[in-house]
Amino acid sequence: MSGGGSGEAGHSGPGDGGAANDGAGGGAIRGDARPGLGRGFRFQWEPAQKAHVLLYPEGMVKLNGSAGEIMKRCDGVRTVAEIVADLESTFATTGLEKDVHGFLTMALEKRWLEMRA
Amino acid sequence: MVGDAGVSADGGITVGATVGATAGPTAATSGAPADTSPPGDTVGAPSAARVGNPGPPLWLLCELTYTCPLHCVFCYNPTDFAKTEQQEELSTDDWIRVLRQGRELGAVQLGLSGGEPLTRDDLETIVGEAHTLGYYTNLITSGIGLTEERIKALKDAGLDHIQLSFQDSTREVNDFLSSTRTFELKSKVAALIKKYEYPMVLNVVLHRLNIDHVQEILEMAQSMGAEYVELANTQYYGWAWHNRERLLPSREQLRRAEETTNRFRERVGSRMRVLFVVPDYFERRPKPCMNGLGSVFLTVTPDGTALPCHAAKSLPRLTFPNVKDASVEWIWRDSPAFNHYRGDSWMKEPCRSCPEKTKDFGGCRCQAYLLTGDPDNADPVCDLSPHHHLVTEMVDKASAPDAPSPVVEHPLIFRDRKNSRALSG
């Protein structure tokens, strides 16, 4: 399972995060952190595109299957460790931690996600 | 930022370059590859007129009304907007039907603009319905009429994003360009937008009369706490087309403005992001207008006319359908007007054999029509177009040392009902 979002972001608007990081994705991802959807984003399944999408001011990112599976578990309640465990059990596999951490690091940097207290 | 046509309405929808090229339709290009299938190559086709199998209209722009408290000289609204009387505007139920049908087709981004959408007292109802249906809702506004009561109600209804337009950094120029006294009001609205935790997105339409104030405009944006600023040079459609000689900046003005913007960007870093949209008359390749007409973008005008681009009403020979008479699905997938510019069989040379046609789709049809009289020609912005000189000559004229002082010698035509009636005969 590879954890990257597909590269369909639109303009460099408020939603794409860019270089700004606010320190959120700067360090290693902690297993007890609780990722939730970033402010100003909307995340949903789109039947017409057969994909999960992230919507932000005047733009959209179409997510690949793996990214969608991770994102839909980021509800601000479940911890990173719980999300990894859930994915491994759902897809009957092991060793997903690195991929999930990789995706989360990127998503935090782009502000798609933010860590909840 | 929708665009291609690249004009910025007062509300600040930048059609064309901004909207078109960046934010809007382009943002949503996923799943919508250039459609190069020949006409008639229909997929499961209820209509022989359907070209290919169009993807969803990812962007739905609802121009809720032509009523606007501002009278901006660069508005992209049609100059004959006064022909649409307020009582002919779509009802709340009509708009909700359009939203539902659009969503069923896969529309995800919703722009609510005008005119000034806040002049509709059912805006909160429309936003609430759109939010429930699953749209990301963008309000494109001058801010006039956005009281604390209304912003709270809109937030509760699920409004996701507000784009606020300013005309200039100074009260004098702002008010002059919009022919109103609104600068202080807009500043108050900017504070409300922050208070209600919306990202602060400012849109300022640039042109000859305010482009020298870019430094001040950026500082104003910074002091308001803007996170994102779009400096959208005017694109010449609608009212801006009529005022083009007075609005087109000189090459030197544009160079200085870009330099100033770059210096500012270096200073503030990622705290505030600035998009600078070059007026496309200064380019050598056309913008991929709307990602190709009928590809991702659908506009519904106040009276219900459906258009593949906000400026498309000006295009000759096409009869645009109305949502009062037809379903959004039929309009998008099967109507002749929406299929006309799909694919490339409509193209003439030099576009037809050009390898770049899958990238820029020949540029903007409205611009080709306005400048050459034939909407099927290459967009004259392209230096491969035999009409490219029309654009360079205009820029040369604007850049000449003896270029006319715009305001004194040629009065600007402000967007109001009286001028609209005069222009539309």
Image (cartoon, rainbow, N blue to C red):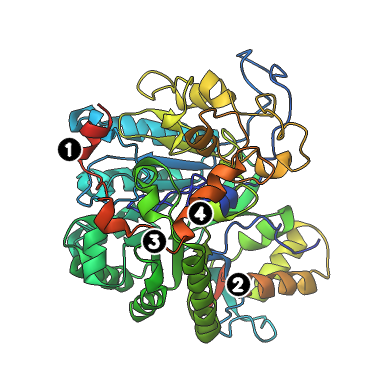
Residue B50 spot, x, y in % from top left:
62, 20
In this view, the residue in front, B385 or B3, is B385
Crowding near pointer 4: few (<14 within 10 Å), some, many (20+)?
Answer: some
CB contact under 8 Å: marks 3 and 1: no
Q: Is residue B418 left or right of residue B325?
A: left
Disc 1: host chain: B
User: For the point 58% across and 82% down, which residue is it?
Assistant: A24
Mark 3 sits on what residue? Answer: B208
Residue B143 visible to an observer of this rendering: no
Between the residue at mark 2 and the residue at mark 4, the CA separation in whole angstroms equals 34 Å
**Local secondary structure at mark 1:** helix
Q: Earlier in the sequence, mark 3 or mark 4?
A: 3
Task: Give the residue type that dot 1 points to.
Answer: Lys
Mark 2 sits on what residue? Answer: A18
Pair 2/1: label in front: 1
Is residue B65 shown above or below B207?
Answer: above
Between the residue at mark 2 and the residue at mark 1, the CA separation in whole angstroms equals 46 Å
Task: Give the residue type that dot 3 points to.
Answer: Arg
Are dots 3 and 4 on a single chain? yes
Between the residue at mark 1 and the residue at mark 4, the CA separation in whole angstroms equals 30 Å
Task: Give the residue type that dot 2 points to.
Answer: Gly
In this view, the residue in front, A108 or B270, is B270
Are dots 2 and 4 on a single chain? no
Mark 1 sits on what residue? Answer: B418
Q: Is residue B1 left or right of residue B76?
A: right
Are dots 2 and 1 on a single chain? no
